[in-house]
Image (cartoon, coloured by chain):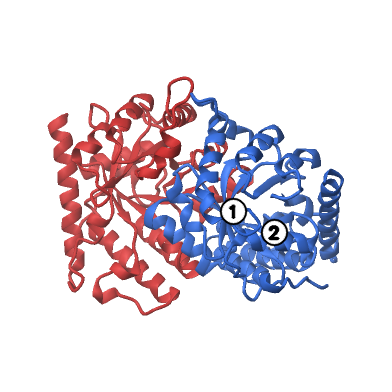
Chain colours: A blue, B red
Amino acid sequence: MTAPNINSANATTHAPANAADRLLARIEAAGAPVCVGLDPVAEKLPAVLRPAPGHAAAANAIGEFSRGVIDAVAGIVPAVKIQAACFERHGPAGVTALASVLEHARAVDGLEVILDFKRGDIGISADHYAASARDAYCADWTTVSAYLGADSLTPFVGQGHGAFALVRTSNPSGDAVQSLRLADGRTVAEAVADMVASIGAASVGTAGFSALGAVVGATKPTDAAALRIRMPQQIFLVPGFGAQGGGVDDVLPCFRSDGRGALVTASRSVIYAFNAADRAWHEAVRRAAEDLRTQIGSALGVRA
Amino acid sequence: MTAPNINSANATTHAPANAADRLLARIEAAGAPVCVGLDPVAEKLPAVLRPAPGHAAAANAIGEFSRGVIDAVAGIVPAVKIQAACFERHGPAGVTALASVLEHARAVDGLEVILDFKRGDIGISADHYAASARDAYCADWTTVSAYLGADSLTPFVGQGHGAFALVRTSNPSGDAVQSLRLADGRTVAEAVADMVASIGAASVGTAGFSALGAVVGATKPTDAAALRIRMPQQIFLVPGFGAQGGGVDDVLPCFRSDGRGALVTASRSVIYAFNAADRAWHEAVRRAAEDLRTQIGSALGVRA
């Protein structure tokens, strides 16, 4: 399979000054703003990869599976999002596998690598987490909590790196905090959005988008439309498409009217698109990624 | 040095049904509600432990230092809080060191082990993080984000495990979200406090405190007093004492009038209480932990 080589945004450098510019270039080259989410669990792997009991075997198996998925979707999607929790549950062996998966993904031309680790800390601890993402895992983007304010966001942005701040999550219980109404009429999520837009203004690239983006769940289309207006320069990372219940109509409000500004992530519907006994599981994953690209690309084409 | 052995709450079991009951018993046995925070960085280690360049050497060094600090404070304080970020910045080698430090702390009789990793995710990812804390790291308590609602809290509580939800953090920029005023008159932090109190009601132990506690920074004494009223059954984990600027008077509002209900954490003022060239650095750390215990114990004694 071939992967696009995007001049200044290739795997060797990963280094244009602004992460948003690089991600947008890769989306354009791939033809659709889609991302494959890697949330691997040992029990769901193809039979041929199913591990023996124990953390070490499980970590190796989900690592091998993840690298296989990356190979399968290379050249089809412009980004992968790797869920740290799936690896961290296996302790040090899992984290070693996580590092190997990120290293593998970084070597694919034209592929942006998002480490979904949702860290949220302050001061030197935030600096440590940012250093872990940059130096130890070499992620292009991370996901980060915004509840602690600018301190927990700014260390993750700059020098070619970007971050998606948690603004509006896809789970029902998030409403208990995010949908609260402020005295000034905004919801808490809208206030966080305004903060993210303000902080992100310092890192806007030449394409008009910031290296500080926002997580906005696919299951909240009404909120997404309001948030799109409040964060015109943020790229939305949109989880919850597919298995979590979000459909094409639900994700469209995350985009600007020109069809830009969001990255739709599908996880289980792509990475588990095989029959467990199928030894050629890569092909099923590849077809599912192609379907994802076609589905979102067509919807945006019709809309534009 | 000797460490107290607290009958049903010893290191072998770590297993009373309720984490709050166990923590309170350990605080009582130690004589003061204090916690030593381990935020080790290679550049600040005693000269004798200062590592060569590189992640592996740094990870080994901060691991050895942390185990030494734990030995030094054993029998003096009832709890240690280990900052995951310091270890994760060194990648897989750091996480291996982190696991060794937690294992070491767990083997100390009478010592409660808090993994400060501030995770915040939903669904199966939250379950993964909870599994990592329980199975891979064997932490008694974790710190967790509350912005995603109950989904991000409940997996971390129960079966002898507890969690401290981020309610009011010690950093100035947290005000941008946490101090926002809701239409009903509460601040966002107060609304999160009410949610934590409500969710935590399901895990209250025989001593009247919940296994779901709250992080309330030592630098916000006025807010702490209001939050203490809203969360009568929450144990407050109080960072920011000492080096971050919080003093004794600042942490007293975190306690109930009976002197219970909070755990004051000091990090840099204890773990770096040595001269860099001092080979007997353990003794300086031990004395600083004793001073911490005396300082907080006396203040509560006077108040009670």
Pointer 2 indicates a residue of which chain? A
Mark 1: which secondary structure? loop
Mark 2: which secondary structure? helix
Residues indicated by labels 2 and 1 sit on the same polypeptide chain: yes
Mark linked to residue A210: 1
Name of the residue lying farthest toward the bottom: B52
Amino acid type at image mark 1: Ser
Amino acid type at image mark 2: Leu
x, y percent for residue B24: 31, 38
Residue A245 or residue A213, whichever sits in front? A213
Q: Quadrant of the N terminus of chain B?
A: bottom left
Report crowding for label 2: few under 14, some 14 to 19, many 20 or more residues within 10 A (C-alpha). Answer: many
Residue B303 or residue B134, whichever sits in front? B303
The reply to whether callout 2 and callout 1 are in contact (CB within 8 Å) is no
Tell me which residue sits at (52%, 63%) in the image: A133
Q: CA distance from mark 2 to mark 1?
A: 11 Å
Pointer 1 indicates a residue of which chain? A
Quadrant of the rendered structure where residue B254 is? top left
- The tag earlier along the polypeptide, 2 or 1, is 2
Name of the residue lying farthest toward the top: B184
x, y percent for residue A87: 59, 59
Residue B15 or residue A5, whichever sits in front? A5
Tell me which residue sits at (42%, 50%) in the image: A151
- List the residue tagged with mark 2: A24
Vertical placement of A102 versus A143: above or below? Answer: below
